Amino acid sequence: MAGNSNKSEALNLASAGLSLGANTLALTKAVSDTVITGSSLVDICRDMMKWLARERIDEAEFEYCTIQTRGLTIPNERGMKIREKLAYTNPQIKKLGGLNLTLAGSLGRMMAFDTELTYMVTTVAAVMAYHDQKFAVDALCYMVQDTKERHEAGAHKKGINYPYSVHRARLRPVVGKITESIALNVVNSGHHFRDIPEELEKFCIHTVNPSTFSAVVMATVRQSESDVLLYSGRFYGDVFLWLQVHYSGILEVYIGGTRLYQEVLGHSKGRIKMLIRDFCKPEQGLHGSSTELLMSVDVSGTSVPILTRSEGLATGLSGANPSKRQGLYDIKKANGLYAHSVLSPSELNDICATAQAIAKWLLELSVKPINDTLFGFQAELETTVVGATNIGHLLKHWPVIGQMKFGAGCKALSIFRGLSQEDKEKFDEKSPTLHEITEYFPIITTLLESIKSRCDCTNCLSLGPIGKGKLGCLREKALTLVFTLLAHTIANGFGAPDASGVVDVDLLKSSVQHLLAELITKDTVLWDSWFAVAAIVYMGCPLDIPNLEIIEGATSIVAVQYGSLAVVGRWVDIAAELTVSGCFGFDIGEGRLCGVSDEFAVVQAERRMAASLAAAEILQRPEATFDNSDMENSVVKVETAIIGAAGIPYRLLTMVQSNLHLRIVDPSDAIMSLCRSDIPQCDHKASEASNRTEIAPGVLELWDLDKAIGYWNTENDHVELGLHPIWTTAVCDSHLKLNVALSLSFHGCIIRGPRLCLECAIQLAMASGRLASARRILRVDVKSRSLIKSST
């Protein structure tokens, strides 16, 4: 029956124009049965073929890879929990910031549901706790070579050696792509294993090289029913973690002769004793150079050596390169930094205190809406405006760095010194260098001067500029840490709960440099630049704003997809309430944005569609009366669609439809209009005015939203100055209606709530002094749970 079923499935695929090998078909069948029960196998296979085409992998090579890698080992119950987590998150199809999320059907996630290939996912997840993706690729290839070419027991007893193999060379490109997919779609999405048990976490974690790792773990697979002794000079955390999620017997750890850990990991009769001769602690400066590692198995009461390794092992914390997700502000584990290996505790404290002081200064900067089409704000760098909106007010969350306890840090006269007019004119032509930026922050220059005296690199000895030092320069490392902490502050403010472990540190540093350059030379706080820094920290994505392709008709960035993570600006959903407070933030989700096919994609908003004809040429003027009880009765709907081609920024089309009109609007116009709007109050009581107020002809025009969607442009109609009316809406009874009206009113509006009478609203609109850009009056309904909070 099974054979007939497979034959039928093959025929169905063939009829759909798809042809997959037996092992590839088995993988897609496992996904269909386990993850998306009842869905079309043809659709899953089509997704698989798309992935192969996108990654430029020949289907025959992928089939060869699945044959060679299938069934090397099976994770234990603890390891299989990662599959349970993926199975739980996969069906959670939902909306994110008004955009549709669908299943994250990547190859890396699919492989977790094929029992004979699950170990590849769990191995990558375990390895990335201490290493990068390259290590994981090497380890998996060595594991296959160990299984296929070194079957005999004790093959490594005279030393570990994996000679060049044409089979390994053939495997590596495909294994590399699979590992990348697992890293981006599983590990970077937060599906990894917990840290070392509490009993062992106080000890220094050492690591081994890929060949030793593979030899050790495959030896335990072959000896799963035996008693095995793993003797080493140091505690190798990468080996321990892999055993903890794959071994099915009893695992014990002895350090200095004392058993500190024991756990039954499955039903196997085997037992592994990890005997560590020496130990060290993370805070120690020297970690020793012991590289000894021996492995033996108990055969009829006799210890038989099966593995020996005495050189080539990484030692100390510098051997680790963790690439799983990390906590915010945890600079000791920040990818590629390893500050603790070269910087003293007092220097680290000075770095943290410096970053904290700059972060506090940033959060307290006063801002006002920028007079531009960009989504952003103008900052006041020299003085603090009492009662004005500040950057901290714009952020979704208040960053916790301000509450963290550091020492006094380096003593500097000030945090920032302003640019002269001459400097600003100079930077009109070019962007400031990294060294020039640091010169405007005395607190940074003081820090770098204190560290430079201990650095012996040629750039520091020759008094060279910052930014020109090589890897290993203490000044460069210190500045990288300061910028990393500032980036984490921004990500924290945007709503990121933690940080990706696959961040390109150089890109992050240059992105913060770009953000600071905009701030100090142009006094601007631009959404795209701040969003990019937060997205890089949270997702690890390669979002390079200065080099982002400029697409005609596109405006602000609204979303980013990277692997199975997506972030969407929290103001993108115009059907939800918009607020100035917290507008610099994003919503995060696990899944794939509908319409996006790439592993990495940037989505920009489509520019608002202009009205085709001037309203004055089409509409008759309404009566010069206004009824306070009038409700906005237009039926308004919103739909979104992401369009675009692979390799270039995608476009988000936000389409609003009324009874007679369909129009594209830009969500960033709505939030910027709100930022430019006033929400005033007056002292007049409702009883002092009649329910119906007579307005002089030509002063006020009442628009229903249906016609406004069709005919409102950014500017009011260009009519005779003396006849220019103020436009107003009836009562907007939903967030959507209000936000649509805002998106069509670039210069901001007078938002009239129940505590502002019509006469005062008209006076405020007329007092703006703008004619073609005169403010419109938007009415809101108090019954709808205060669409916009009133301000005093």
Image (spheres, grey):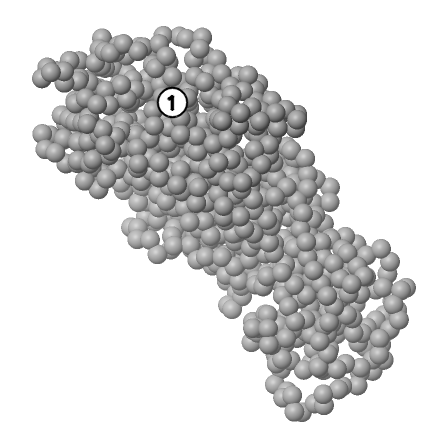
Residue 568, how many percent across, how many down?
A: 56, 49
Q: Between residue 381 and residue 655, name the one nearer to us.
A: 655
**Residue located at (45% from left, 18% from top):** 67
Q: Does the rendering let one see residue 619?
A: yes
Whether residue 413 is visible, yes or no, is: no
Give the residue displayed 72% in from the left and 90% down from the top: 690
User: Quick check: 442 above or below 15?
Assistant: below
Query: What residue lies at 48% left-to-right and 26% top-to-bottom?
Result: 2
Nearest the viewer among 112 and 724 is 112
Q: What amino acid type should be assigned to the residue bearing mark 1?
A: Gly
Of residues 29 and 60, the one drawn nearer to the viewer in this rendering = 29
Report the residue that reaches farthest toward the bottom: 688
User: Residue 205, percent across and down?
Assistant: 25, 32
- Residue at the spot of label 1: 71
Left or right side of 494 for 355:
left
**548 left or right of 91?**
right
> In which image quadrant can residue 135 be found?
top left
